[in-house]
Image (tube, rainbow, N blue to C red):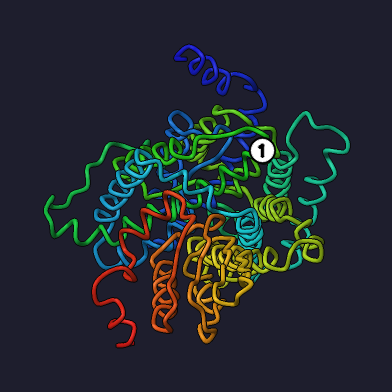
Amino acid sequence: MTSLFQSRYAQQWLANPRRDIIAGAVVALALIPEAIAFSIIAGVDPRVGLYASFCIAVVTAVVGARSGMISAATGAMALLMVTLVREHGLEYLLAATVLTGVLQIIAGVFKLGDLMKFVSRSVVTGFVNALAILIFMAQLPEFTGQGLLMYGLVAVGLVIIYGLPRLTTAVPSPLVCIVALTALSMAMGWGGPEGVLRTVGSMGALPSTLPVFLWPDIPLNLETLRIILPYAVPLAVVGILESLMTATIVDDLTDTPSDKSRECVGQGVANISAGLFGGMAGCAMIGQTVINVKSGGRGRLSCFAAGVILLILIVALGDFVAQIPMAALVAVMIMVSIGTFSWSSLTNLRLHHRTSSAVMIVTVIVTVFTHNLAAGVGAGVLLSALFFSYKVSQLLDITSTLSADGEHRTYEVRGQLFFVSASTFAEAFDFREVLKTVRIDVSHAHFWDLSAVAALDRVVLKFRREGAEVELFGLNEASKTLVLRIARHDKPGAMEELDGH
């Protein structure tokens, strides 16, 4: 078993080295402006986001579960850090990042990643569509205050991205787009402080040194824990949620499985590393992951290369990277947005069941309007659960037969009895009918919760109050255990409790 794991792990590194390295280079270029932008959102120096992206990408490549997935600093995580940075400063953010990683490792150890099985396909589709919309919306501010040149270069970039693959796929078209537009901008003098185009360098100074080990300079006491825990918990939840959703999407894109609980551990180790090397918390990035997969990246080497090339670019080639026009990166991200959106989900609105479409639409709306992935997915999962509960409750069927002498009636119950179907069950009996014996056959039913047992209590006690003898039979072992433990109809004082209500 160990040798098989080692062989598979090595295959994930070495199966596609050329394409993985090229794809990693494309991703690294796209990571730079986003990492800087996310640092600005969080209220920290651009180095914090760039160092975090390097650490997280390299570490998840080694210890993560999903090969081909890109993890780095993200906007969803940055939004959760704003108040902590403003009120307590960078050192507490670094401590919160470390604690976030610890919580994610705990989640992985307890296999909380398995909870992904409760996320329906409609929620995943809504999550993907919402992210595509948010990625596109994030590019719109780049056009503010820019002239026709910006629009023209973005259009040229999109022509290169979508046109080049018709001629050759030897080199990823997004990389050609970035190099070509950068060369054109530098040749024409459009960038720089006096230029008419915004460049990567316009977003903030790039770091010129390697990250160093940095233990947060804060007191290690309960007061510190009280400050950082309320931020670390949502950071851990959002990080796990976005990473596992992205992993699910890559599973579909590459037709390969991944270990979700192990991914939680990998993300946790990566965030601990980021916090100890001066970076902020991060997670998987669907936009960069799609760039990676579309560029041919499939293995762990692509994510590792993205992190290493990112560091080389910002430290050794910072002057050149600063000249990359934002128009080139906007074109790449628009391509990501278009490629990420599930266009078939629009045509399927008429084909799929209305509840599935409603779940997808609600997930999109909540995510886009709150910019909170956890809120959107949470709303989708909750709505899916409500729809499922309602559908299951409709499968309850209760029929009855009356004896020839009109004194004995047998009710046959089929289906699932729980909080949604409990009222339907209780209303299916005629308590005004004068009977000597009522037999309730639950051989084809199952009692799931307190509400179902409480409904059974009311039915039995109401029949007894009308003078009928009630016989309950057919309980399966699980239902019998539940009924015997919490049912009240055979307990002393049960009738008084009914009359009291």
- Estimate the x, y position of residue 185 in percent, counting from the top left: 70, 50
- Estimate the x, y position of residue 75 in percent, counting from the top left: 49, 58
Kind of residue at disc 1: Val
- Estimate the x, y position of residue 315 in percent, counting from the top left: 45, 37
Depicted 215 relative to depicted 383: above or below: above
Quarter of the view holding residue 40: bottom left
Residue pointed to by mark 1 = 293
Front residue (pair 445, 6): 445
Front residue (pair 164, 501): 501
Quarter of the view holding residue 405: bottom right
Crowding around mark 1 (Cα neighbors within 10 Å: few <14, some 14 to 19, many 20+) is many
Q: As drawn, is 38 to the left or to the right of 119?
A: left
Q: As drawn, is 382 to the left or to the right of 273?
A: right
Query: Number of labelled discs?
Result: 1
Say what secondary structure mark 1 lies in.
Answer: helix
Q: Residue at x 41, y 77 (%)?
A: 458
- Estimate the x, y position of residue 114 in percent, counting from the top left: 47, 43
Front residue (pair 282, 202): 282
